[in-house]
Amino acid sequence: MKSKTFTSRFIFITSAVLLAAVSRLFPHIPNFTPIAAMALFGGVYFSDKRLAFIIPLIAMLISDIAIQLLFGWGFHSTIIYVYAAFVLTSIIGIMVRRNVSILSVAAGSIISSILFFIITNFGFWASTGCQMGVSGLNTAYLMGVPFFAPTLLGDLFFNSVLFGAFYFAQKRYPILIKA
């Protein structure tokens, strides 16, 4: 009996997410990473909603462990906020799956970038003990502004790569199209 989970489609999507995670190990502009793209792509294309969270999260965790072992900074005081934004981006992907288009993927990319900015900069402020109250929170957001552009551009770029590659792969290999 054929497995309904380990199809060619599943293997392609999983491989794409894992390759995106591995790309985090190569030199890059700070915050120009495939993190949100992995979550959005997984949310859209893994038909099992549990796998839409689990596989991208495992790929992210493996790449964080590798970054920690290789470079010493894979785990940090705000990592829980990064993972929270990651999970929310998977939820956005699940919502986008109803109508996958260039516009919906671009909107998902932009929304996930904004969420990442809000959540992780809040996390930075919270990890400092909420110093200086609301003015400290404002400072945390202001300090994060220079990192927003590379985050947004990275999300748009890596989503273009993942979604574009899958689109063209489906055209070339119809077995990848969901039945």
Image (spheres, rainbow, N blue to C red):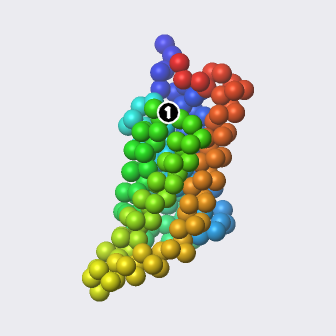
The residue closer to the viewer here, 114 or 179, is 114
Which residue reaches farthest front? 103
> Eyeballing the image, is 12 above or below 124?
above
Q: How many marks do you count on the picture?
A: 1
Camera sees residue 77: no
Residue farthest toward the right in the current orientation of the protein: 172
Residue 137 seen in this snapshot: yes
In percent of width and height, residue 178 lies at 54, 23
Residue in the picture at 63% in, 21% down: 175
Q: Who's the residue at 42% across and 75% down the image?
A: 141
Residue at figure coordinates x 60%, y 59% from the top left: 154
Q: Position of residue 6 (x, y in %)?
A: 52, 27
Give the residue furthest to the top: 1
Question: In the rendered image of this protein, does residue 91 appear above or below residue 63?
Answer: above
Q: Residue at x 49, y 58 (%)?
A: 113
Q: Is residue 45 left or right of residue 23?
A: left
**Could you tell me which secondary element the residue under label 1 belongs to?**
helix
Q: Nearer the viewer, residue 11 or 154?
A: 154
**10 Å neighbourhood of mark 1: few (<14), some, or many (≥20)?**
few
Q: Position of residue 55 (x, y in %)?
A: 46, 43
The amino acid on which the numbered mark 1 sits, given as a three-letter code, is Asn
Q: Quadrant of residue 123?
A: bottom left
What residue does disc 1 label?
A: 99
Location of residue 116 in the rendering, given as x and y in whole percent from the top left corner? 44, 61
